[in-house]
Image (cartoon, rainbow, N blue to C red):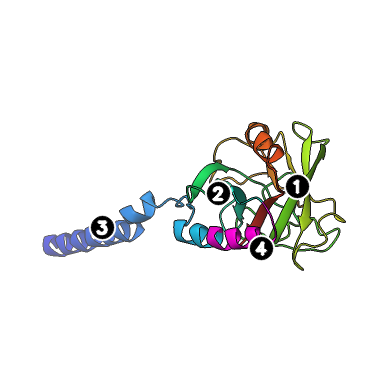
Amino acid sequence: MRIFSLIFAFLLLSSCKTEKKNNVQPVDELLKVEKKPEINPDKTKSKAEEALLFCKAKNLNTDFCILIDMSLHSGVKRFMVWDFKTASISKKYLVGHGCGNNPWSMDGSKDNPSFSNEDGSHLSSLGKYKLQGRGHSDWGINIKYLMHGLEETNNNALKRFIVFHSWNMMSDDDVFPKGSPEGWGCPTISNNAMKEIDPVIQNSQKAVLMWIYN
C-alpha cells in the first residue's frame, strides 16, 4: 500500500512540474518591447540626391529642403531639414498627418497611415511640394506656408486648404510608442519647431521643396 502511495505522489508531483513549466513564459517574451523605429540613412540620402536634382531643374532652393518620411511611426521625428551643402540632416521634428476616418486629434493611424489627394478625405498627400507664400494661420504660432502640389498625387493641396503650420498639440520630443495627434491632412509640427524653421524658410531667396514620401 505504501508503494502505491509513493507512486501516486511521484506522478502527482511530476504533473504539477510539467504544468508549471508549460505556463512559464520565455524570458525573451517577457522582455520583448516594441522597437523604436529610426530614420533609414541610405533611404534618406537617396531621396536627398533626387531632391537636389529636382530643385535644380525647378529653380528651387538648393541650400536645403524638407524631407518627410511617412513610412516611419508618427511618434518619432520623421520631418527632416536636409542640408545640401553638408549632405546631412540639420534638424529633425515630429510631424503629424491626416486622420482620415479616425477621430480628429487622436493617433488612430500612427503606423501605416493612408494617403489621398481627394478633397474631404482628411488625409495627407504624398509627393513634392513648393513652399511659397507665408500667411496667417489660426493654429499654433499663427504662421502658415502655402503648399503648392507639384505632382498628380498632391495637386489638390491648395484647393483642399492643405498648408504647413504648427499645432499646440504637437510635442517637441518623440512620443513613441504613442503617435502624434492627427489633423485633416496638413503636415503639422510643434510651435517651437516652427519658431526654428520659420526664419530659415522666410529668408530663403527661392521657394523651398517639401517632399512627403512613404
Q: Is residue 73 above or below residue 117?
A: above
Task: First in sequence, mark 4 or 2: give its number.
Answer: 4
Q: Is residue 135 left or right of residue 47?
A: right
Task: First in sequence, mark 2 or 1: give its number.
Answer: 2
Residue indicated by mark 1: 183
Q: Secondary structure at mark 2?
A: strand
Identify which residue, 204 or 187, lies in the foreground.
204
Mark closer to the observer (4, 2)? 4
Mark closer to the observer (4, 3)? 4
Q: State the separation of the CA atoms marked 4 and 3.
A: 72 Å
Q: State which quadrant residue 151 falls in.
A: bottom right
Q: Over which residues does the magenta segment extend?
A: 48-60
Task: First in sequence, mark 1 or 4: give its number.
Answer: 4
Task: First in sequence, mark 2 or 3: give its number.
Answer: 3
Q: Would you say residue 116 is visible in this rendering? A: yes
Residue 12 in percent (x, y) is at: 25, 60
Residue indicated by mark 4: 57
Are there few (<14), some (14-19), or many (20+) residues within 10 Å of tag 2? many
Q: Could you tell me which quadrant the C terminus lies in?
A: bottom right
Q: Is residue 21 left or right of residue 196?
A: left
Task: First in sequence, mark 4 or 3: give its number.
Answer: 3
**Dot 2 and dot 3 residues touching (CB under 8 Å):** no
Q: State the separation of the CA atoms marked 2 and 1.
A: 25 Å
Q: State the separation of the CA atoms marked 4 and 2.
A: 18 Å
Residue indicated by mark 3: 17
Residue beneath the point at 51% across and 62% down: 46
Q: State the separation of the CA atoms marked 1 and 4.
A: 33 Å
Q: Could you tell me which quadrant the N terminus lies in?
A: bottom left
Residue 88 in percent (x, y) is at: 48, 49
Residue beneath the point at 22% across and 61% down: 14
